[in-house]
Amino acid sequence: MTRLERTIGAVLRAGVIASSLALAIGLVLQFMNAPGAQALLHAGILTLLATPVARVVVSIVGYVRERDWTFATLTAVVLLELLASAVAALVFNKRL
Amino acid sequence: MPVVTPALAAIIFAAGAVSGGFGALLGIGGGVLLVPFLNLALHLPFTVAAAISLTTVIATSSSVSAARAGKQLINMRLGMLLEVATAAGSLFGGVTAQMLAQSTVQKVFGVVTALVAIIMLTRLQRRNVILDPDIDPGPLGGRYHEEESGGTVTYRVKRLPLALAASFVAGNMSSLLGIGGGFIKVPVLNAWCGIPVRAAAATSAFMIGVTATAGAVIYYGTGQLVPALAASAVLGVQLGSWGGMRFGQRASAMWLKLLMAAVLFVVSAVMFTRGIQ
């Protein structure tokens, strides 16, 4: 297993555990009408959405470290596409 | 927006567990089952159903790929290359989804699932596996140990432009329809690009996290992603995909394809009928 594969595995696992915990606790709090439920649910969703983004970021770092410029560029393009969808979300949000 | 009751959350949790189980088994992310259920049975607006499903696709992709990372079944280089196309397609589809009528999207869903089921059935016997372990896999190919034959499978990637085109379409359908898009990529990668079905499914499952994120971010920004419902579905899917992955190690490739085709035909017919009503 390469170092990059190990890092990617760790990032994905951490993201899944953190988001699942936040979502599970948030959901329980929501049905107890406890304060902070919505904030925790949103935090869980955002962690979930951030996990693949973090995986792309560590891939870029990994490929730069390996001096694999082709794949560093390709993964950087993927990151830009993810940022573009966040921009699109903001545009739609303003319009609604 | 739907009212979130404990009963609704429980139903969505159960639906997530079932679709997550099948998703992990078939390498399709489960959305192709979850979206029709949320939209047709629970009467959630299509965009709300798609947004919930996309979050489960991300969760499945992350947890399945975390477990498989470093086991060679995922072709990470090929995955990251094809992600350039899936993410672009997903961005485009997410924007399109905000502009189309629900009935139009339902018809697209029906047509797409039927087409893929037909492709799957016509290619049932094709394996495209190069069993000579000494062959050079090339810069994008791969090599992995196969459980059922006990041998090492080595493959080269053929027709890369086709793989990229299929990935763009898959990404587009992903955010528009709320699915992973694996059910478009896996048959194409397997049938025409020389990639064994297990490697194609694992690589697709790895990619759909990034693909679905590009779409889900747009739904989140527009307020169509209901966190409590997404939470129920995500937790259900986590449970289901854990079970599906354990079983998937033992299921044969041909039965996986047959089961997948049968499921897709049913989903297609139901969704298309609703779209023209």
Image: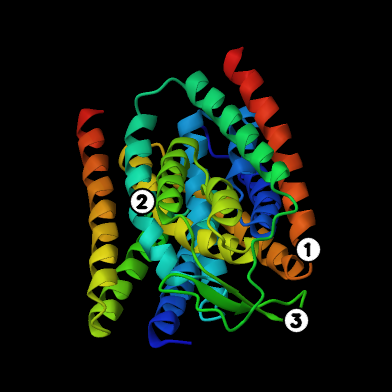
Q: Which residue is mark 2?
A: B85
Q: Which residue is mark 1?
A: B252
Q: Is residue A66 above or below residue B47?
A: below
- Pointers 3 and 1 within a single chain: yes
Q: Residue B214, percent across and down?
A: 35, 49
Mark 1 is surrounded, within 10 Å at the Cα level, by few (under 14), some (14 to 19) or many (20 or more) other residues, namely few
Find the distance from the CA under tag 2 to the CA under tag 1: 30 Å
Name the front one of labels 2 and 3.
3
Q: Which residue is mark 3?
A: B150
Q: Quadrant of residue B7?
A: top right
> Tag 2, which secondary structure?
helix
> Tag 3, which secondary structure?
loop
> Tag 1, which secondary structure?
loop
Q: Residue A41, percent across and down?
A: 43, 54
Q: Is residue A56 left or right of residue A45?
A: left
Say which residue appears at 60% left-offset and 42% top-offset.
B32
* Mark 2 residue type: Ala
Q: Residue B112, percent across and down?
A: 57, 33
Q: Residue B187, percent across and down?
A: 60, 50
Along the viewing direction, whichever of A11 and B15 lies nearer the viewer: A11
